[in-house]
Amino acid sequence: MGRVEADGVRRVVHEVIGEVLPDVAVDGISGSQHLRDLGADSVERVEIIMAVRARLGVREPLGSFAALPDLDRLVEFLCAVRPA
């Protein structure tokens, strides 16, 4: 995974989090945090993942995202499954 690619994916994830959770300061988000840590309930977490998948063109099933422990692993996973 290239640094530039990961930064772009991270930017998309942060943008979507900011849209779904407007009270969260996206500048203060740490890669070690989980969406739950940011106050996202189960519906908001699904909404965030679905929006990120759509923006990045990722077709992995929602269940594939369930075991990811934090935002850093989410970005790594998205980079790995994102179409070229």
Image (tube, helix red, strand yellow):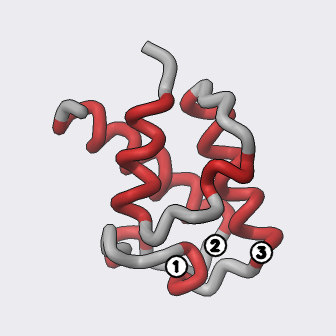
**Would you call the spot at circle 1 few (<14 residues within 10 Å), some (14-19), or many (20 or more)?**
some
Residue picked out by circle 3: 42
SS class of the residue under badge 3? helix
Q: Position of residue 2 (x, y in %)?
A: 19, 31
Instruction: Please give the name of the residue rendered at 60% of the width and 44% of the height, measured from the top-left corner.
Output: 52
Asked if residue 10 lies left or right of residue 56, the reply is left
Amino acid marked by disc 2: Leu
Does label 3 or label 1 sit earlier along the sequence? 1
Discs 2, 3 touching: Cβ within 8 Å: no
Few, some or many residues within 10 Å of mark 2 (<14, 14–19, 20+): some
Query: Are the residues at dot 2 and dot 1 in contact (C-beta closer than 8 Å)?
Result: yes
- How packed mark 3 is, by other alpha carbons closer than 10 Å (few <14, some 14-19, many 20 or more), is few
Q: Which mark is residue 24?
A: 1
Mark whose residue sits in front, 2 or 3: 3
Note whether 71 is above or below 77 in the view shown: below
Q: Residue furthest left?
A: 3
Mark 2 or mark 3: which comes first in sequence? Answer: 2
Residue under pointer 2: 21
Residue 84 lies left or right of residue 49; in this view the side is left
The mark lying in front, picked from 3 and 1, is 3
Residue 41: where, in percent of width, then height?
Answer: 74, 80
